[in-house]
Image: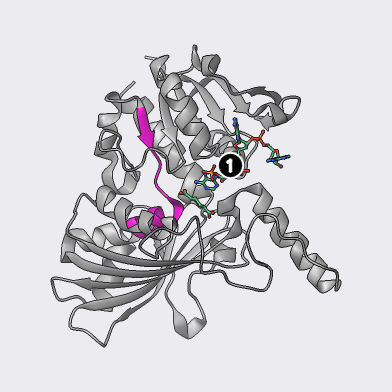
Amino acid sequence: MAEKSFHVAVAGATGAVGNQMIACLEERNFPLKSLKLLASARSVGKTLKFRGEAIPVEELKENSFSNVDIALFSAGGGTSLKFSPAAAKSGCVVIDNSSAWRMDPDIPLVVPEVNAHAIAQYKTKGIIANPNCSTIQMVVALNPIHRRYRIKRIVVSTYQAVSGTGQKAIVELLEQTRAFLENRSLEKKVYPHRIAFNCLPHIDVFLENGYTKEEMKMVNETRKIMEDESIAVTATTIRVPVIYSHSESINIETEEPISAADVRELLQDAPGVKVVDDPAANRYPMAIDAAGQDLTFVGRIRKDESIANGINMWVVADNIRKGAATNAVQIAEILGKNYL
Ligand code: 25A
Ligand code: L14
């Protein structure tokens, strides 16, 4: 029997994540019947390369999905709220990268290494949500530990790349850096303060409780994906002048006794994880090494000597790939293979 193949659309194709989605479909040899590229009217007239071919960008409209099986959305929350329901209604399955649908109880929130089985719930609304980038890499690293040692509490601080905010933020970091080095005045368009040579304790908007929305995504999405509301999570999310890959300092407290060697051994065989942990040789995960990769890198694994059952670790992954595009394409692969 011939392999099944699908009509796929990418909405937000000209953005940082959309571009990478197209690259992932090509690299992973996704079984395609056709590929449609959608963005706002601003991008009409542009073409993007796929398998050596220049594909024109079309304007995203409600009727863009009549002959589409799977739509990968990464055009921001507002666009997704507006267009995903129409896309789903016309019979395609939407895999959405924005935060718009993630906490909807009728919509599965999926990291294939952790809860691939949840994809089955796509039928209720025809939408599957792709989690927040910082959350994805954290649960890939922590889920195996939780299953074996029961995590009671997670304390995480992030060091997040500007590419999370899209192409325009990459341009802002580069332009501010150049202006700073050339002693010219700096322009601020994307972030409220200079990001070049700085750290901002501010990602997404501030909420009433004093946390940012990005911090609360890490709390709520982690529990939903790991399917355990009892895990206590507290997060501080920081923007750093890095282009690709988020880094995270993670502290966990477990129910069962745990050692650094236990964690190293467990993560050695964990899906989607690569342990890089040889401090004597100056080997530990770094953003510049994770960029362009699909794995989640874990290192600096050590006992938290201040409590009975605690571990500290450093977790790094490419936020645009595993944190967004790769995860979405992995979901599409399972959806196509097992459900469509
Ligand atoms: O709305 P949110 O949720 O706050 O999301 C904010 C941004 O975060 C990115 C994405 O940025 C989004 O716009 N994003 C969303 N989820 C993400 C995630 N999980 C994420 N980033 C990382 N991880 P982006 O710029 O990289 O990508 C945006 C894409 O969405 C398309 N788009 C936007 N609004 C749309 C739309 N498509 C259809 N309908 C709409 N209403 C967008 O296409 C892009 O593909 P575009 O055509 O609007 O922009 C293409 C080029 O145009 C330039 N540009 C952008 N804004 C302006 C502009 N030029 C002039 N004026 C502007 N205001 C850019 O250079 C872009 O390359
Ligand atoms: O997926 O880094 O919810 O500015 C929104 C903010 C992704 C990252 C999401 C950022 C994010 C983003």
Numbered range of the magenta stretch: 127-140
Out of 189 and 84, give the one closest to the viewer: 189
Q: Amino acid at mark 1?
A: Gln
Image color mode: one colour
Q: Which residue is mark 1?
A: 20
- Say if residue 14 shows up in the picture: yes
- Say if residue 73 shows up in the picture: no
Please, is residue 79 above or below residue 248 in the view?
Answer: above
Please, is residue 7 above or below residue 52 in the view?
Answer: above
Asked whether residue 264 is drawn in magenta, I would say: no
Asked whether residue 131 is drawn in magenta, I would say: yes
Image-quadrant location for residue 108: top left
Please, is residue 272 above or below residue 330 in the view?
Answer: below
Q: Is mark 1 within 8 Å of ligand 1?
A: no
- Write the residue at 39% across / 65% down: 210
- Write the residue at 42% across / 50% down: 132
